Image: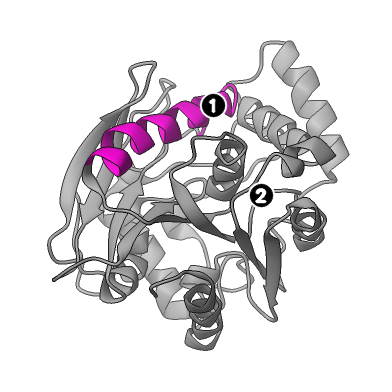
Amino acid sequence: MRFISLPDNPMPEGLEARTVTAGDGVRLRAALVRPAGQPRGTVALLQGRAETIEKYYEVIGELVARGFVVAALDWRGQGGSDRGLANPLKGHVDDFADYDRDLAAFTASLLRAETPEPRFALAHSTGALILLRALRGRDTPFSRTVLTAPLIGLGSMNPPGWFVDGLSGLLTAAGLGDFYPPGASLVRVEERSFEGNPLTGDARRFSRMLAIVRDRPDLAIGPPTIGWLHAACAAMREASRPGFAAAIATPVLAVSAGADRVVKPVATERLIRRIRLGRQVVIRGARHEILMERDDIRSAFWAAFDAFIPGA
């Protein structure tokens, strides 16, 4: 569960490795970074599917520079955390309740035990959906939360959501949940091209993502399994019900990417309208990974973050 440091992606100074054990025994890789001097609070950094803590070194540094303690986590099945299948490249969970266990353990054994209040969360894509599920409870540790490109609906690069939901459900029921979906691209992450990618318009940051998995192939995963898609569709379907948003009392800022093809910003808009203390900002021209985007797009994000998070 060691961390790597590369010339264009140096490890944040003072990063401390942690191991969190979920309620079902899965070991999760986590990290803690403290600022110099008295902290202004804590930001929990919750990544998207197929990401790693290393990918967020720049973001961690920017949060620490703002005076926050940062706690970060690799979800089960990716990064340096335990993999659930014999083929470690398959990104898989049977149910998003598995991720709920990860977040509960991370909250109990790291956030509440080692970090100061007030506590905030910054969550991307799949991580944002997992966080929203947790915000329905009364015992949330977070005063405010910021979501980037939350996974609420599938974007235009994917087949229609109703089709993915129905087909993945049928194939999972047939015992094929651990298989890749029909037509899934098995191109290795480090071999992907910048041209036409749906993630970022910044070539340097795109190359940095690839450099991480070239140096540590064990951190990479491939496409989601059929079972993962079925679980994600079930979680998105649940999030679309009016009662889901009505149960969230924590202030939520959703920052959507105007050029997102991975998720559907209009689905985020519908959800945010139902959250009593929710608001949405759309950054024009941004692709899915807003925090890995061009400097002008990232500056727009940080302006929204700083206006929303007290103490920043």
Quadrant of the image for the C terminus?
bottom left
The residue that disc 2 covers is 151
Side of 182 relative to 42 (left or right): right
Residue at x 70%, y 65% (from the top left corner):
279
Where in the figure is residue 154, as x and y percent of width and height? 75, 49
Q: Main secondary structure of the magenta part?
A: helix
Image spot of residue 254 (x, y percent) = 64, 63
Which residue occupies 39% across, 62% down?
Answer: 210
Residue 100 counted in the magenta span: yes
Q: Position of residue 244 (x, y in %)?
A: 74, 38
Q: Residues within 10 Å of mark 1 (few under 14, many from 20)?
A: many
Element type at mark 1: loop
- Judge depth for marks 2 and 1 and give the one in front: 2
Viewer can see residue 1? no
> On residue 202, which mark appears?
none
Q: What residue is pinned by disc 1?
A: 93
Asked if 231 appears above or below 13 in the picture, the reply is above
Stretch in magenta: 91-113
For the residues labelled 2 and 1, the Cα–Cα distance comes to 16 Å
- Residue 251 quadrant: bottom right
User: What is the quadrant of the N terminus in the image?
Assistant: top left
* Tag 2 near tag 1, CB within 8 Å: no
- Where is residue 13? Give x, y as percent: 14, 66
- Taking depth in this image into account, of 247 and 146 the one nearest to the observer is 247
For mark 2, give the secondary structure: loop
In the figure, 18 relative to 270: above or below? above
